[in-house]
Amino acid sequence: MTDLLPRPAVFAPADGSFPLPPGIPVSGPAELVDGVRLALAVLDPRPAEAGAVVVERDASLDAEAYTLEVTATGVRITAGDRAGAFYAGQTLRQLLPHAAFRTVAQAGWTVPCGRVEDAPRFSWRGVHLDVARHFMPKREVLRMVNLMAAHKLNRLHLHLVDDQGWRVESRVAPRLHEVASHRPRTITSHYKDDPVYDEVPHGGYYTLDDLAEIAAYARARAVTVVPEIDVPGHASAILAAYPSLDARATGGRQPEPFPVLDRWGISPAILSPLPPTIDFLTSVIDEILGALGETPYVHLGGDECVLDDWAASAEIVAFREELGLESLSDLHAWFLRRLADLLAERGSRAVVWDEAFVSGMLRPDTIVMPWRGPGVARRAAEAGHDVVQTPVFPLYFDYAEASSEEEPLAIGDAITVSDVAAFVPAPESWTAEQREHVLGAQFQLWSERLPDGRAVDYRAWPRGCALAEVTWSGSAGSGFGERLEGHLGRLDALGVEYRPPAGPRPWQLGGTGRRRHRPGVVKVDEAMRRLEEMTHLADSTRPSM
């Protein structure tokens, strides 16, 4: 019981144990029983009128909260909702041998007696997965959901759109998946080197049926999918498919179309903010919402927008003046506000990166993800916006875990497990009201240098274990290092190719014939200083790195 992760609020061990054989009966309200059975699927629990595992509903418990009591005569779970019952099942699973994290039980096990009382500190415990830069097949997304559930993480932020690809089928705008979902090649050279490309086509997209499946699969495991359609910048792929939406195409102009971007970094491609673009995006977002089903949150992006083509368009400038807006930043804010209003009409809440907050005019209920550091995060909370902490340091997991050439290629260095474990989402230096606006935090897996699931595993874990504890328990508690060491056996059983604490395994090394890391090219502390400065500039929407 000593290596429970994330750490529960209350844990009281007791003498004795109770057997949990395959097919063990579980009784209680059907919805709660279903959550427990799914968490303990390796034991194939069976619903029954009476069972050795009894699940009860307690309406006084908060969302996701539960109690778990194991005695010599049985197991009793109390939860206020299905998510709480599911998490109780996950804790019960952690009390079993590591083999319980395999797909098949060779035999039953015994569970030690004790009592757990538990509830999350933060409601948003997230993972951001960029499937635009490198497409991750559906199986990888479903696998990520399983790993999130095992760690009591509950928000899967899918970055579906960027310059390098559009990743969703559209039946109202089919060129999005026919044209914008693939590129002819991908850059392979190091940052600031002369460009070298692999000359290998890359692409893929999720059908609307895939999206519906992902959402239902996630929902059953207490995970909410947060789709991101990043606009109005990062628009090369969209404009490759529908060049009429290009800001340069206003006033009868017909510029050379943007291609789907084959390199990393920022493109000047930006959507026109005029009403036809709003109408287009509304119809596409409606498709996505229809596939996902109930979607509490939709991320609109709003980051790293080059507004030069807006300034160069007489039609866009006239539109800005007609709206009574003083600047292009105001128009940027208006555009995102308009989309957020449309989402609100559909029962979804808008989420944006912090550039959109700096531009202003957000709906009061818009959630801000302040990636550029704690300064802009505090300003957003002070302005009354709910905040999900997403700072580059220490939550951008595309940064290397060590400043070493032995690491696989990363954007910069270094962010360690200890850095993540030390993170405080709601600092004591903030006022109580500001802290109240912190919904939680999430780690970011930007995929420019994550070409496949093995690379994602290496970057995500075990740093993701640290954030799971911080967001569930409020902090990485006493003995976190020792508990993490024990928890790695569960990751082994799950087949996770994580980065070992001592460093990469031989086949994970950077080196000859592989894309090795170059230490010191981008240092995270220097990047954070530069980003913080950018958040105070009037031209804050412009790319920061």
Image (cartoon, helix red, strand yellow):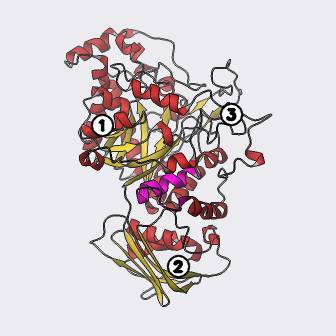
The x, y position of residue 458, in whole percent, is: 64, 47
Q: Which stretch did the figure color magenta?
A: 463-480
The x, y position of residue 279, in whole percent, is: 32, 30
The x, y position of residue 443, in whole percent, is: 49, 45
For mark 3, what is the residue?
Answer: 517
In three-dimensional space, the C-alpha distance between marks 3 and 1, rounded to whole angstroms, equals 35 Å
For mark 1, what is the residue?
Answer: 380
Of the image marks 3 and 2, the number of the one nearer the N terminus: 2
Q: Nearer the viewer, mark 3 or mark 2?
A: 3
Q: Judge by depth and name the residue closer to the eye, 80 or 6.
A: 6
The residue lying at 61 percent from left, 71 percent from top is 100
Whether residue 395 is situated above or below residue 512 in the rendered picture: below
Amino acid, disc 2:
Pro
Q: Secondary structure at mark 2?
A: loop
The x, y position of residue 498, in whole percent, is: 65, 52
Q: Secondary structure at mark 1?
A: helix
Asked whether the beta carbons under mark 3 and mark 2 sit within 8 Å of each other, the answer is no
For mark 2, what is the residue?
Answer: 45
